[in-house]
Image (cartoon, helix red, strand yellow):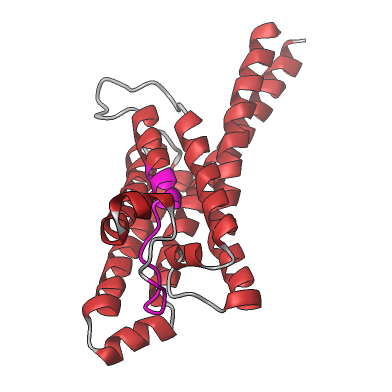
Amino acid sequence: MEYVNAREEIVDNFYRVRRALGVLGFLLPLMLLVIGIAFDGAEPSISDYYHTLSRDVFVGILTAIGVFLICYTGFRRDDDERFSDDLVTTLAGVAALAAAFIPNRGTLNTSLEPQALSQHLFGVFICDMAHHLAALIFLLSMAYLCYFKFARTAKPGRRAIYVACAWLILAATVATIVAATFRKIGTPAQSAFVIEHQLVFWFEAVGVWAFSLSWLVKGRTDRAIIRKARAVEAAGR
């Protein structure tokens, strides 16, 4: 009895963390877009919202995601696995925190004067590069987790979802890089097209929402384990 209850509590803790990660990931692009439209106007990318009235939302949600990922230990590494859950999620969490507190350069109309402590210390250009590297590490870590961790032990139905999320994150990451490149070094017409249609934002949003979906599905798996444990306990009475 005590063993079952303790196991349920542990699984329930995993479920709460995974659900929180999924909800936060879903809310990040949505809240930035809604607040941006209401007050400042839509920005070309998620990162650009740091330089608007939505900064608190951007930094707050990314910080929460980063802390949850760092605190999430996952399962012990098997002998045939290259990296442990803890290592991958910790790397992703640190990257999320870096992306939150090391801002990008901002939109083309944003002043290049330092706006954050990191920019005062290291300069706007270095922080811009560091921010995009952190965002890339975060997304790649999540794709790795979906494909090599979540999908590895899942049933066929959920495995297909995790694999799809992994490929969607990778595709969105590549599309983001391509769109951001056209935005920065493309022709004036290409840059204007990317900015006008917010291509970078929507590609980033797709990647973040795929990340969100994978964690929400993983959380539902935890709830199924709890229900099964309770059924076994009830049958044994």
Residue 114: say if magenta: no
Q: Up-down: is 208 above or below 86?
A: below
Q: Up-down: is 35 above or below 4?
A: below
Seen in the image, is 234 located left or right of residue 136? right
Q: Residue at x 53, y 63 (%)?
A: 29
Q: Residue at x 56, y 79 (%)?
A: 41
> Which quadrant would residue 18 be assigned to in this image?
top right
> Which quadrant would residue 116 be assigned to in this image?
bottom left
Seen in the image, is 53 located left or right of residue 141? right
Q: How many marks?
A: 0
Q: Which residues are magenta?
A: 95-111
Seen in the image, is 110 located left or right of residue 7? left
Q: Residue at x 48, y 66 (%)?
A: 51
The answer to whether one can see residue 160 in this image is no
The answer to whether one can see residue 92 in this image is yes
Q: Residue at x 41, y 74 (%)?
A: 110
> Which quadrant would residue 237 be assigned to in this image?
top right
Q: Up-down: is 180 above or below 90?
A: below
In the image as oriented, which residue stretches furthest toward the bottom? 189
Image location (x, y in percent) of residue 228: 65, 26
Instruction: Locate the N terminus by quadrant.
Output: top right
Image location (x, y in percent) of residue 156: 43, 44
Q: Nearer the viewer, residue 113 or 167?
A: 113
Residue 102: say if magenta: yes
Q: Up-down: is 183 above or below 127?
A: below
Image location (x, y in percent) of residue 85: 38, 30
